[in-house]
Image (cartoon, rainbow, N blue to C red):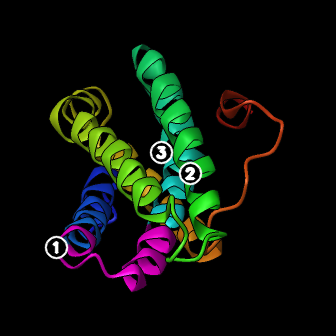
Amino acid sequence: MSTDAIVMLREGHKEIRRLIRSYRVERNPEVIGPFLRALTVYTYIEREGMYPRVCVLFPDAEPDVLGFVEEHHIADVLGAELYDMRPGEVAFDAKARLLMDIVERHMDAEDRSWFPRVRAAVGRKELREIGAWMTTLAERAPQHPHRPSAQTPWDAVAA
């Protein structure tokens, strides 16, 4: 497997999209657990590994990163709420679909415009180094969503 950070994140997108499609087709609530686990690991390695390093190497990316971090925050809140719900609860399906819509928009923005800009601005060597760090982060990433702390989402990236 490649350690190129963008390749790794695109592989994460494929897995998350597969789980979203599966839920939409089958409406099987058992898909939600693997979806939330994949999403939690993915957002963790992106927020802790990719975003801070890219902002240092490519300062023009910071406005995009600020927006992406806010989207992660929304996904964290909805994901934690969904994780605490039972499939039969009234809002379960609506919350799952809304979270999936937000996540898809986020991944589309990265795939279409952000990743190409980052690849053009950040060297191959640096993307491999970021990817190696993200691999380490994935090993210790949380496995399910938690309610975000009172800390603002940008504080974690800026630290």
Q: Nearer the viewer, mark 1 or mark 3?
A: 1
Q: Residue furthest right?
A: 150
For this rendering, which residue is in front, 102 or 37? 102
The secondary structure that dominates the magenta segment is helix
Q: Earlier in the sequence, mark 3 or mark 2?
A: 3
Q: Position of residue 31 (x, y in %)?
A: 37, 80
Q: Amino acid at mark 1?
A: Val
Above or below, comparing residue 66 to residue 72 in the picture:
above
**At x 20% / y 41%, what residue is drawn?**
111
Res. 83 visible in picture:
yes
Q: Earlier in the sequence, mark 1 or mark 3?
A: 1
What range of the chain is rendered magenta? 22-38
Above or below, comparing residue 26 to residue 61 in the picture:
below
Q: Going by the image, does 152 lie left or right of 25?
A: right
Q: Nearer the viewer, mark 3 or mark 2?
A: 2
| Circle 1 Cα neighbour tier, 10 Å, few/some/many (<14 / 14–19 / ≥20) | few
Q: Quadrant of the C terminus?
A: top right
CA gap between label 3 and label 2 equals 22 Å
For this rendering, which residue is in front, 12 or 32? 32
The residue labelled by disc 3 is 50
For this rendering, which residue is in front, 88 or 32? 88
**At x 19% / y 68%, what residue is drawn?**
21
The residue labelled by disc 2 is 78
The residue labelled by disc 1 is 25
Q: Going by the image, does 79 lie left or right of 116?
A: right
Please give the label number shown on residue 46.
none
Q: Position of residue 84 (x, y in %)?
A: 67, 69
CA gap between label 1 and label 3 equals 32 Å
